[in-house]
Amino acid sequence: MIGLLSVTFLAAEDQDQLSISVEAPPGSTISQTADLAERARKIIAAFPEVKNVYTTIGTGSSGGMGGSGSAAEVRKATLTAALAPAEDRKRSQQAIETLLRPQFEKIPGARFSVGGASPGQKVSLVLAGEDEASLLTTAQRVMADLRTLPDLGNVTSSASLLRPEVIVRPDFARAAELGVSASAIGEAVRIATTSDYDQNLPRLNLPTRQLYIRTQFAPDRRSDLDTIRDLRVAGKSGTVPLSSVATITLEGGPAQIDRYDRSRNVTIDIEAQGRPIGDVINETNRLPSLKQLPADVRRLASGDAERLTDLFGSIGLAMAAGVLCVFAVLVLLFHDFLQPMTILAALPLSVGGAFGALALFNFSLSMASLIGLVMLMGIVTKNSILLVEYAIMTRRDHGVGRTDAIIDACHKRAQPIIMTTIAMVAGMIPMAIGLEGTSAFRAPMSVAVIGGLVTSTALSLLVVPVIYELVDEFKTRLKRKFIAKPHGGVPATVKR
């Protein structure tokens, strides 16, 4: 049954809000970004489920594995659309996002990212390395392979787009001859292009206020290479032109460099479009570009993929600790190490029913469903305790045989066991069918509990008595074998 289940961390919820990020090309003005955002807003507002759209321009966007956000830029915009309540609209949030993506592709000259950072919406792949060129080449190759996978949304990268920048490379030998230091070159270029620091600026004192006096190139001259080459730099014998001590070129470079553990990294975000995270991860792991990474590029665990691995490890540890604690309590209760094994034998019966119910109703194995499995442990163990404890009491107080005692326990304890199961199932049904609010988290947990209760209740009355007989017979044979024989060589009588 486990093979029939998909795996995810948390199922994507049907929220009453959409988030769309717009990124214009490097060097775009705020008016150009506003035009792209307005075109996207009209597309979003055309959906009847959308109540209003709020647009912001110039906000920083979160990116990189380290959680740091990029600086605010006028070429970036965010559109937040408020949707009608889930019960008042025919389409879910995921369905609306799926319809929006192909419409945004018709807008040229912009990157669009649909969906927020909620669990279950995106899968993140993080590549890290020291060689910038190799890292970017590998990231582009991985993105090309990802775009060939079906049923996925946009594939975006945190690698900054290259923007034009003026590169000044000092000629240190020539600068040493003229007595020009590297700090003098840097200070001259900084003041000419971005002005000096506020604390170093001269001030004009007026009766009511104080004005800073800035000296720098005019905006239209700051990218002119001839103007920058003629910039005067202080030397030992006076000022010299910048072109005599440095080479000035116009090249492209990233606006932001992301690092994690001091290594450059590129985060590739994949929009899952409502698909289970585990299925998306399995498909990406089979890509040739990820199987054959260069030696200087490595893959880091992050996002829902990392949380998914931690989840199964933590839940497995919690279940193991819970079973050990229950076993210890049962040993103290029955003063026996074997009969508690009979009680714990009902746990696998509930797990099979829980997995079967999840597969039947097409739910994934997620954190919510695993929480339901932990809840089952206590309820199922209690039902077994009712059977075994009554059989032991009947044999001890009334001298009834082993088989008759366990059959009588099934007759007498069946009613409270079934009543408890019916009450628990009735309490879980409203959450399973989602009578109110979103059921993305509660429904898998409720279905797992209901399926486990039904199968464990039906099978406990059949399997637990058989295991009780087998364990008791094994214990009786151990006593016959290891209890010391009395004098005369006659074995001691073991009461059965």
Image (tube, grey):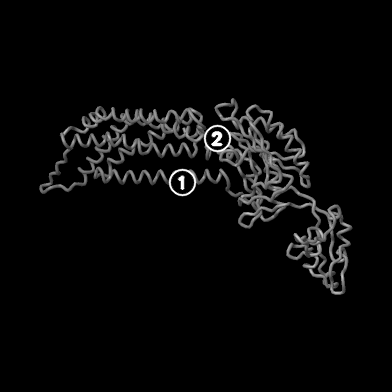
Q: As drawn, which residue projects farthest toward the front?
A: 207
Nearest the viewer among 495 and 214 is: 214
258 to 31, vertically: above or below: below
Q: Residue at x 29, y 43 (%)?
A: 330
Q: As drawn, which residue projects farthest toward the bottom?
A: 237
Q: Residues within 10 Å of mark 2 (few under 14, many from 20)?
A: some
Q: Quadrant of the C terminus?
A: top left
What's the mark number on residue 163? Answer: none
248 to 85, vertically: above or below: below
Looking at marks 1 and 2 on the same chain, the residue that comes earlier in the sequence is marked by 2
Q: Provide residue 139's location: percent of width, then percent of height.
A: 68, 46
93 to 216, vertically: above or below: above
Q: Residue at x 39, y 28 (%)?
A: 426
Q: Provide residue 205's location: percent of width, then percent of height.
A: 78, 63
Residue assigned mark 1: 314
Residue assigned mark 2: 13
- Residue 402 falls in image quadrant: top left
The answer for how far apart the CA atoms under marks 1 and 2 are is 23 Å
Circle nearer the viewer, 1 or 2: 2
> Can residue 296 be seen?
no
Q: Residue at x 79, y 63 (%)?
A: 204
Q: Secondary structure at mark 1?
A: helix
Q: Amino acid at mark 1?
A: Ser
Q: Residues within 10 Å of mark 1 (few under 14, many from 20)?
A: few
Q: Provide residue 75's location: percent of width, then percent of height.
A: 74, 45
Answer left or right for 86 relative to 191: left
Answer left or right for 80 relative to 25: left
Q: Secondary structure at mark 2?
A: loop
Q: Provide residue 372's location: percent of width, then percent of height.
A: 43, 37
Nearest the viewer among 110 and 169 is: 110
Q: Amino acid at mark 2?
A: Glu
